[in-house]
């Protein structure tokens, strides 16, 4: 099966865009979890008696952000593979 050269170039650009999108998602998640950690440490420093509650909620928030990251990476990989076209 012969694929036109234009279609190959479009697929290459889509794969590159998907890779860039996955990288942006990873950077955003890193920033978000870093801010959660910083806020949790500041909160624990201000109120040490609430450290268990702060730690628990920050772990839950980090897990939710990781879930969004996983979704974003899966979507970009599916786009790169051309699923659904």
Image: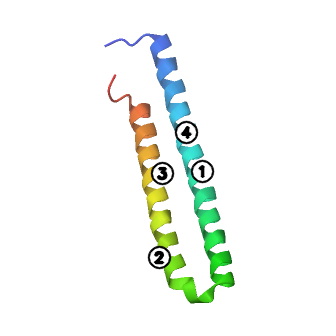
Q: Is residue 53 above or below residue 18?
A: below
In the image, residue 16 lies at what x, y percent? Answer: 55, 32
Q: Nearer the viewer, mark 4 or mark 1?
A: 1
Checking the image for residue 21, the label placed there is: 4
Q: Look at the numbered disc 4 and give the secondary structure of its residue.
A: helix
Q: Earlier in the sequence, mark 4 or mark 3?
A: 4
Q: Answer left or right for 60 relative to 1.
A: right
In the rendered image, the quadrant that contains the C terminus is top left
Query: Which residue has dot 2 on it?
Result: 56
Q: Answer left or right for 37 relative to 7.
A: right
Q: Earlier in the sequence, mark 4 or mark 2?
A: 4
- For the residues bearing labels 4 and 3, Cβ distance under 8 angstroms: no
Query: Which residue has dot 3 on it?
Result: 69
In the image, residue 43 lies at what x, y percent? Answer: 64, 77
Q: Residues within 10 Å of mark 2 (few under 14, many from 20)?
A: few
Q: Earlier in the sequence, mark 4 or mark 1?
A: 4
Q: Residues within 10 Å of mark 4 (few under 14, many from 20)?
A: some
Q: Quadrant of residue 44?
A: bottom right
Q: Residue at x 61, y 74 (%)?
A: 40
Query: Which residue has dot 1 on it?
Result: 28
- For the residues bearing labels 1 and 3, Cβ distance under 8 angstroms: yes
Label 4 vs label 3: CA separation?
Answer: 11 Å
Q: Nearer the viewer, mark 3 or mark 2?
A: 2
In the image, residue 3 lies at what x, y percent? Answer: 39, 13
Q: Look at the numbered disc 3 and give the secondary structure of its residue.
A: helix
Q: Residue at x 45, y 14 (%)?
A: 7
């Amino acid at each position: 099966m012969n694929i036109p050269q234009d279609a190959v170039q479009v697929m290459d650009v889509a794969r590159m865009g998907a890779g860039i999108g996955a990288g942006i998602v990873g950077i955003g998640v890193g920033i978000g979890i870093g801010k959660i950690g910083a806020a949790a440490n500041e909160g624990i420093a201000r109120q040490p008696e609430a450290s268990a509650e702060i730690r628990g909620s920050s772990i839950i928030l980090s897990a939710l952000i990781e879930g969004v990251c996983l979704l974003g990476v899966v979507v970009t990989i599916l786009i790169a593979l051309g699923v659904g076209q």
